[in-house]
């Protein structure tokens, strides 16, 4: 074997055949970082009625009395400003839930800080999945109960974009006249939370991942 061929063989052995298997996960996934390990609720903190949340078959099962599960892990010290959040969601008939962003942990009750992105296909509340609850709403969705779909939340500056299965559902540009940051429903910074709405609602979440965006 000539010296040049030997050199190339050594490079191949050291760095592989162009795969990304040995790269850090966040690099291999183009900046996406998992917030849920698929097995436990490590990195998450529940406020009340902890029995509402459990892990089964790689998914967070939400079913029980009112409760909220807050991300409290190490990624960005659980304080996100500009980001993309993607989750796979499955709803069941007449179920209601939500995904909060820019929120903070509170001991009980529905979070008073941050925005809630609705998770609801067929509940009696007409505000469907993708709505920013109490702010801007949609009344129809391109998905159905009992099937997995992807809910994608993008926050950059004062703009929120919600996509479902890659389809833009709404775009909201928050005016400067809303409540000051950390005093209510306002774009600011904070963590995420999943909502347990009521005992009659059952919703599943899996493959929860975030991409932190520059300021």
Image: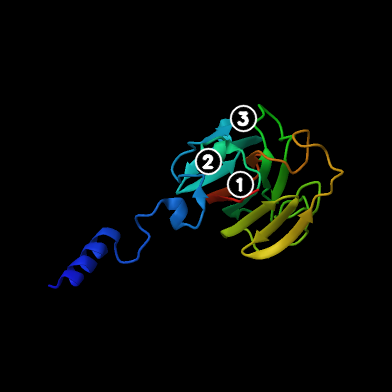
At 47% from the left and 57% from the top, the residue drawn is 29
Q: Tag 3, which secondary structure?
A: loop
At 78% from the left and 55% from the top, the residue drawn is 172
Q: Which residue, given by chain and number where applicable, does mark 2 sit on?
A: 75
Work out whether residue 187 or residue 134 is closer to the camera in this orientation and state it. 187
Residue 163, by quadrant, is bottom right
Frontmost of labels 3 and 2 is 2
Q: Residues within 10 Å of mark 1 (few under 14, many from 20)?
A: many
Marks 3 and 2, how far apart at CA: 20 Å
Q: Residues within 10 Å of mark 2 (few under 14, many from 20)?
A: some
Residue 17 visible in the snapshot? yes
Q: Which residue, given by chain and number where applicable, does mark 1 sit on?
A: 202
Q: Residues within 10 Å of mark 3 (few under 14, many from 20)?
A: some
Above or below 195: residue 48:
above
Q: Which residue, given by chain and number where applicable, does mark 3 sit on?
A: 47
Frontmost of labels 2 and 1 is 2
Residue 58 is marked as: none
> Position of 48 compared to 26: left or right?
right
Marks 2 and 1, how far apart at CA: 27 Å
Marks 1 and 3, how far apart at CA: 18 Å
**Residue 77 location in percent, x, y?**
56, 36
Task: Report if the CB atoms under discs 3 and 2 are less than 8 Å apart.
Answer: no
At 62% from the left and 65% from the top, the residue drawn is 166
Above or below 8: residue 65:
above
> Position of 78 compared to 141: left or right?
left
């Amino acid at each position: 074997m000539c010296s040049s061929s030997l050199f190339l063989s050594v490079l191949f052995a050291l760095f592989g055949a162009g795969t990304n298997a040995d790269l850090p996960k966040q690099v291999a996934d183009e900046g996406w970082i998992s917030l849920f390990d698929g097995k436990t609720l490590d990195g998450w903190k529940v406020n009340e009625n902890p029995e509402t949340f459990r892990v089964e078959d790689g998914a967070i099962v939400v079913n029980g009395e009112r409760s909220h599960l807050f991300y409290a892990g190490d990624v960005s010290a659980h304080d996100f400003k500009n980001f993309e959040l993607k989750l796979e969601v499955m709803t069941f008939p007449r179920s209601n839930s939500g995904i909060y962003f820019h929120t903070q942990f509170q001991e009980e009750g529905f979070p008073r800080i941050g925005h809630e992105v609705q998770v609801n296909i067929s509940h009696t509340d007409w505000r469907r999945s993708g709505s920013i609850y109490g702010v801007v709403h949609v009344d129809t969705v391109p998905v159905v109960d009992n099937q997995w779909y992807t809910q994608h939340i993008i926050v950059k500056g004062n703009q929120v974009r919600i996509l479902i299965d890659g389809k833009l559902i709404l775009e909201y540009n928050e005016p400067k006249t809303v409540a000051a940051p950390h005093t209510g429903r306002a774009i600011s910074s904070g963590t995420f939370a999943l909502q347990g709405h009521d005992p009659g609602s059952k919703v599943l979440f899996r493959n929860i991942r975030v991409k932190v965006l520059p300021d």
